[in-house]
Amino acid sequence: MDASTHRDEGLEMGEERGGVDPLTELARRLALTTSRDKARGMFFLGVLDVVRRVAGEAARARCLTTSKERRFVPFFLYPINDFLRLSYCAAGLLAPRLGGFDRALETMGEQATRDFLASALGRTLLTAANGSPRRLVEHLPWGYSASVSYGERHVSWESERKGCLHMRRDFMPPPYHQGVLLAVLQTLGARDVRVEGHEPRLLDCDYALAWE
């Protein structure tokens, strides 16, 4: 699918991120999706809520045109390719207001955490963590598998408060998950949280986590 096709769908890309044209990055990620790769509706709704809150209803409506669906049920599963288009469009529109394309993606990731932890699945995760940021991180692979139909994730540790979440075949760009993980740790009161993603290849990323 070429760049003109995406622009006709209403995508607003904004600036480059990390020297890569977001439109090119989006096309590369879309090319690797299948019909089995899906994410829950709560994440679509979260992106649309951020856009409406920051940029207004007209911007929200513009983003919605990138998806085949117009209404989302929080726990239904919807195609990840629609979520990618929606998220990249939203990040392009929000970038001037939030300090850049990556920061816009992080903001959407933070919203995804808030929405998930407010759900029944999220409350189960918080109960299992029992107030411990480390336990919460250890249960994140389960949380992700309950949220999307694709990918593999596992956690490794260097010390009590320093570890790494390894993601394989996950379609969202690193800044989005950095926002997710930052909000996860802050939810349980972790201080001086540091999250850094390293993407050795497209769709595979290791997120170094540390906190006080």
Image: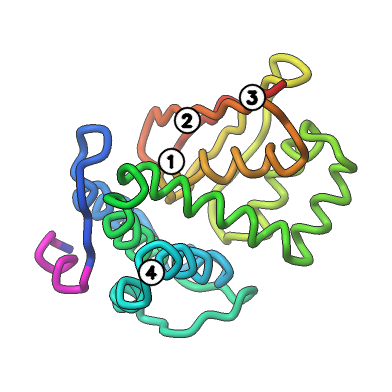
Residue 192 disc label: 3
Residue drawn at x 28%, y 59% as measured from the top left: 93
Kindly identify the amino acid type of the residue bearing the numbered disc 3.
Answer: Asp
Q: Earlier in the sequence, mark 1 or mark 3?
A: 1
Q: How is the image coloured?
A: rainbow
Discs 2, 1 touching: Cβ within 8 Å: yes
Kindly identify the amino acid type of the residue bearing the numbered disc 2.
Answer: Gly
Discs 3, 2 touching: Cβ within 8 Å: no
The residue mark sitting in front, 3 or 2, is: 3
Q: Which residue is mark 1?
A: 175
Q: Which is the main secondary structure of the residues drawn in magenta?
A: helix
The residue mark sitting in front, 1 or 4, is: 1
Quadrant for the N terminus in the image: bottom left
Residue 197 disc label: 2
SS at mark 2 in the image: strand
The segment highlighted magenta reads: 2-10
Which of the pair 158/86 is nearer the observer?
86
Crowding near the residue tagged with mark 3, few <14, some 14–19, many ≥20 C-alpha atoms within 10 Å? few
Residue drawn at x 36%, y 71% as measured from the top left: 56
Q: Quadrant of residue 19?
A: top left
Q: Tell me: 167 left or right of 101.
A: right
Outermost residue on the top side: it is 159
Kindly identify the amino acid type of the residue bearing the numbered disc 1.
Answer: Pro
Q: Earlier in the sequence, mark 1 or mark 4?
A: 4
Give the alpha-carbon distance from disc 1 to disc 4, as whole Å: 18 Å
